[in-house]
């Protein structure tokens, strides 16, 4: 019997180390994307909170694309950041990406991430109802 839940990998270094999937696509059309950061090939690829946010969401969009969904299917975002001073930059990046989509969103300040050079991590939930 085939598992109706599809697990998507991005090949990120922590997926195998910690035992998780970049995204999980459920048979009801919901796709849950794990926390994404601005890391590629084991290093941070952008510096400012704005740039890290754009890159982190691109990691999420790449995972959604593997499930056949796009930015327009996003229904919820969560942004975790290490400093309240970065809310405007993170929010500006979110608005740039989602102004027309308007997902439910949360912005939460946390004490830190696995790599201290990271200042933001994002999660995305997307949904595709019916057929396309």
Image: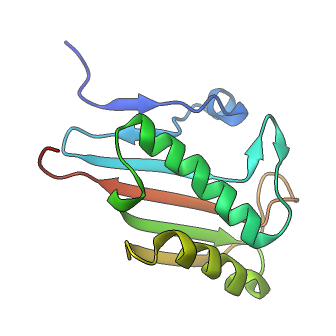
Q: Is 24 displayed left or right of 63 in the figure?
A: left
Counting from the top left corner in percent of width and height, residue 96 is at 56, 74
- State which quarter of the image contains the N terminus: top left
- Vertical relation: 81 (above or below) 12: below
- Vertical relation: 8 (above or below) 26: above
Q: Residue at x 66, y 62 (%)?
A: 54
Counting from the top left corner in percent of width and height, residue 30 is at 28, 49
- State which quarter of the image contains the C terminus: top left
User: What colour scheme governs how the chains and residues are painted in the rendered image of this protein?
Assistant: rainbow
Nearer the observer, 86 or 116:
86
Q: Residue at x 33, y 58 (%)?
A: 73
- Vertical relation: 46 (above or below) 106: above
Counting from the top left corner in percent of width and height, residue 13 is at 72, 32
Q: Is 96 displayed left or right of 31 in the figure?
A: right
Counting from the top left corner in percent of width and height, residue 2 is at 23, 16
- Quarter of the figure with residue 55: bottom right
Q: Residue furthest left?
A: 130
- Quarter of the figure with residue 119: bottom right
Q: Residue at x 47, y 67 (%)?
A: 77
Q: What is the count of numbered marks?
A: 0
Nearer the observer, 19 or 57:
57
């Amino acid at each position: 019997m085939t598992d109706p839940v599809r697990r998507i990998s991005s090949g990120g270094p922590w997926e195998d180390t910690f035992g998780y999937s970049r995204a999980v696509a459920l048979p009801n059309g919901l796709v849950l994307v794990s926390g994404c950061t601005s890391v590629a090939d084991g290093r941070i690829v952008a510096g400012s909170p704005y740039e890290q946010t754009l890159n982190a969401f691109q990691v999420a969009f790449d995972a959604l694309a593997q499930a056949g969904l796009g930015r327009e299917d996003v229904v919820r975002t969560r942004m975790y950041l290490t400093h309240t001073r970065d809310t405007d930059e993170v929010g500006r990046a979110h608005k740039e990406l989602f102004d027309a989509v308007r997902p439910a969103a949360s912005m939460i300040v946390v004490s830190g991430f696995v790599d201290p050079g990271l200042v933001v991590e994002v999660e995305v939930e997307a949904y595709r109802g019916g057929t396309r």
